[in-house]
Amino acid sequence: MLLQLKISFIIILYFFGALFMVLFPPRNYEQSGAKMRTIRSAESEFSFTQYADHTFVLATAERFAKDNPEVVHTVGLAPSTAENRSIIAIELRSDKNSRKPGILIIGALNGMVWGAPNAVLELADKLLYDSNYQTPFFNDYDWYLIPMGNPDGIHFTQSVRSLAPLDQTQWSRKVSARINSRPTEWHKNVDKISLQDTCFGTNVNRNFAYHWQDDVRKTPEHCSQSYPGDKPFSSAEAQAIRAYVDRLGDVIHLTIHLHASFVPKKEFILYPWRYSLRQPSNYRSLQEIGEYAARQARLPDGRLYEVHQGSNNIRVAGTLSDYILGVVGIELVFIVKPYHELFPNYTDINIREGYVRKAMSTILSVVRGWRSSTRQNTLSFFGNDVEF
Ligand SMILES: *[C@@H]1O[C@H](CO)[C@@H](O)[C@H](O)[C@H]1NC(C)=O
Ligand SMILES: *[C@@H]1O[C@H](CO)[C@@H](O)[C@H](O)[C@H]1NC(C)=O
């Protein structure tokens, strides 16, 4: 008798449980996750025929949005650049109805990092279509991707690539030399402060308003590759990125500036501050996440990325990363610098793919390092961390 009562009680309990599930289904069951995404066969790979230019970034962003209207949103940032290009942001959100921790990636703020847009676009493609990337990386985060932060600079350097190199200081000073030569390096955009000025271009990554010009006693002249603008946010690129980041606000938890090192065998994962030797209050966790990422993203020849505060090598002020931490208040900020040649052989696929592979794996390793530091989605079994 007692047993029967117990059984009836349990049946009733299950019935109500089932009823509850039907009436109030878990929200994620319907609207999120793999159902909304197309899983593409592992063979088909996104391939580039060349370094991405602004037109290609725009076309690819539009194709992503058209094929995945539920999860991809393309934004053209305002204001447009001096040559009237709009910086493109690609937003990937796997669940329309909830906000997940946001990751912001900004590439090619520097006119020499040709491979960065390719890397960011390929990362977007993997997050959207490759099941190996979806489960650990897309389902748990929203991604905000700016493949090309300095489209004018990239356009300029790519368009002069076949001319003969001339030392960049001489090139900048001598207008007549510009017809048939190119500067040996160009890290700036192409804006003109005044029409009389023979020099042009602002280094966007010196133009942000946090301790602007705090690293130098004398303003670099306009011809210099580190010219920081005549005031903070004088460049359209810095303005557009500021407006975008301000609009996102506290949605962003982690920011990665995908940059490059131009010195062979010197590759870095850096974090703020870059303007000062003073350490940020969370430098311990920044260092730990960076070291974790360096171990995960060991370089092809077995070396590790050097991980430290940006100012350890050289102090530079007005950078994007210092602005993100110091003004926007996003605590986790990294600058990822895989090696990239200056004016690499444009048609050599291996050089391009080498940078793209390193950049992608390092970005994802930083995310893994962050996950591991928060113990998010990891279980410890007898001292081993297992991700699920
Ligand atoms: C800039 O580009 C936009 C959109 O591509 C176009 O509508 C506008 O007319 C352009 N402005 C100038 C000054 O060329
Ligand atoms: C650039 O790379 C291509 C393809 O690998 C090669 O055929 C060509 O000789 C290279 N050019 C130079 C100048 O090294």
Image: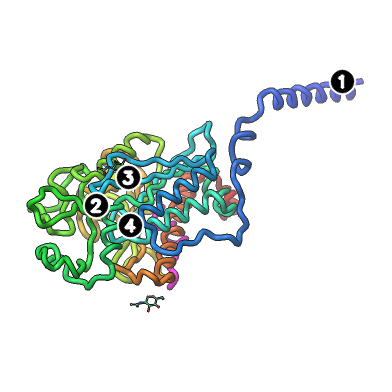
Q: Position of residue 110 (x, y in %)?
A: 28, 56
Q: Residue at x 35, y 52 (%)?
A: 148
Residue type marked 2: Arg
Secondary structure beneath dot 3 equals loop
**The CB of the residue at mark 2 lies under 8 Å from ligand 1:** no
- Residue 217 visible in the current orientation: no
Question: Where does label 1 land, which residue?
Answer: 5
Q: Is 79 in the magenta?
A: no
Q: Earlier in the sequence, mark 2 or mark 1?
A: 1
Would residue 189 appear left or right of 101 to someone viewing this image?
A: left
In the depicted structure, whether residue 124 falls above or below residue 47: above
Q: Earlier in the sequence, mark 4 or mark 3?
A: 3
- Position of 20 relative to 369 (above/below): above
Q: How far is disc 2 from disc 1 in space, using C-alphas? A: 71 Å
- Report if residue 290 lies within the magenta region: yes
Q: Which residues make up the magenta segment? A: 288-301
- How packed is label 1: few (under 14 Cα within 10 Å), some, or many (20 or more)? few
Q: At x 27% / y 47%, what residue is drawn? A: 320
State the residue at coordinates (80%, 21%).
Answer: 12
Q: Disc 2, disc 1: CB below 8 Å?
A: no
**Predominant secondary structure, magenta span:** helix
Residue located beneath label 4 in the image: 259
Q: Is residue 116 visible?
A: yes
The tag earlier along the polypeptide, 3 or 1, is 1
Mark 3: which amino acid?
Ser
* Mark 2 touches mark 4? (CB < 8 Å): no
Crowding near pointer 3: few (<14 within 10 Å), some, many (20+)? many
Task: Give the Cα distance between marks 3 and 1.
Answer: 71 Å
Q: What amino acid is found at the position of numbered circle 4 in the picture?
A: His
The residue tagged 2 is 274
